[in-house]
Image: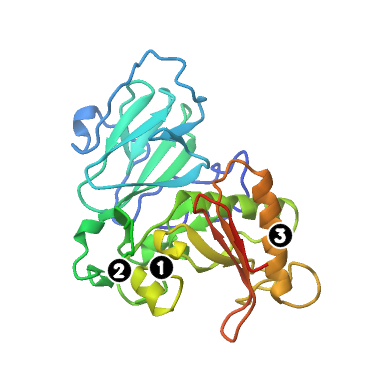
Amino acid sequence: MRSLLSGVSVLGAGILGALALSPLPGKEADAEATPVKQDLDPEIQSAAVDPDADNIGIAPDELEIDGEQVPYPIWYATVLPGEDMRVTVAPQNEVLFDGIAIPAAGWTRTVTAPREPGSHILAVRGAGGELLYEIAFFVLEPSSNIRRGRLDGYRIGNYPADAPAGFIRLDDRGDMDVPVSPHFRIGQFICKQQPGHWPKFLVLSQDLIKRLEVLLVELREDGATDAETLFVMSGFRTPFYNTAIGSAKRSRHMWGDAADVYVDVSPQDGVMDDLNGDGRVSKGDSNWLYDYAEELYAENKTVASGGIGAYSANAVRGPFVHIDGRGSRARWGR
């Protein structure tokens, strides 16, 4: 799928003005069509919950999925095959699943996930047809399908505890460009193993993406960088890969809520930018980013607690900062 974020570099009013509703690879969609209910896929259902309610608790331009407010106009959701997802939105707005309209019947509609794992689009349009939200809707590959440590030949390994219920499935390179937030794409977070193998699988925490978005947007607004994304040096790691590189036995990367990142735009050369302005790239730059994130997260109460770690360069890579959304405070490396 062609990226819906092309040309979009900042958040704010009008971020979706240049976007067009586009199907994922292999999907055919007519965003203008509004089929009658009997034309819907039988696995896409609509259910009213008190259709006369006028105090549902959200504004007309807001969206909730399973009771959680969607934080950005470009976002993602995950669900296991066949499970229901509750979508709450103003009745005058149109909800589409892969371009097929779900009839309005009050504030809350129930979308039942398809039986096959894969990627879909859940979109919300306003009364005037304007695109308000575009949600990458990932139907997960259940972890119960792992056989001898593999999913479709992709090595997963064994979790020490609390294995994820399922994994996001990426069938080909086209899936790599699916946006999961205004400044990040799903392909930035895949594990660095089996580069030629498809499908690939990963886990990705929304708390992590919120922390990364908040950090990048603040850096941009403060004029510290004009980067359109952070370079993700390491995102999700399978337990197999995590063990192979000798990382911590309970590394947060295995649960998809950690990323090792740096700013790389001036110049874009594969290493951290000179953020502290001392004329060289060093541990001082990862320390600067660490301190910036530490102060930001202390003030911003909209993101989950998590970890921050600062790392120096070695023989094969430059300095970087670890960010995670583990749910509790952790600091190291400064």
- Give the distance between the C-alpha atoms of the residues marked 1 and 2, in whole angstroms: 9 Å
Rendered image: mark on residue 237: 1
Image quadrant assignment for residue 253: bottom left
Looking at this view, name the residue that lies furthest to the bottom.
315
- Note whether 46 is above or below 260 in the view shown: above
Going from N to C along the chain, the mark reached first, 1 or 2, is 2
Q: Secondary structure at mark 3?
A: helix
Say if mark 2 contacts mark 3, CB within 8 Å: no
Residue 100 seen in the current view = yes
Q: Residues within 10 Å of mark 1 (few under 14, many from 20)?
A: many
Q: Residues within 10 Å of mark 3 (few under 14, many from 20)?
A: some
Percent coordinates x, y for residue 151 in the rendering = 24, 66
Q: Secondary structure at mark 2?
A: loop
- Give the distance between the C-alpha atoms of the residues marked 2 and 3, in whole angstroms: 34 Å
Q: Secondary structure at mark 1?
A: loop
Percent coordinates x, y for residue 112 in the rendering = 25, 38
**Amino acid type assigned to the residue bearing label 2 in the image:** Ile
Going from N to C along the chain, the mark reached first, 2 or 3, is 2
- Note whether 55 is above or below 109 in the view shown: above
**Amino acid type assigned to the residue bearing label 1 in the image:** Arg
**Amino acid type assigned to the residue bearing label 3 in the image:** Asp
Q: Is residue 150 left or right of residue 176?
A: left
Q: Is residue 112 left or right of residue 57?
A: left
Who is closer to the viewer here, 62 or 177?
A: 62
Rendered image: mark on residue 291: 3
Rendered image: mark on residue 333: none
Rendered image: mark on residue 156: 2
Say if mark 3 contacts mark 1, CB within 8 Å: no
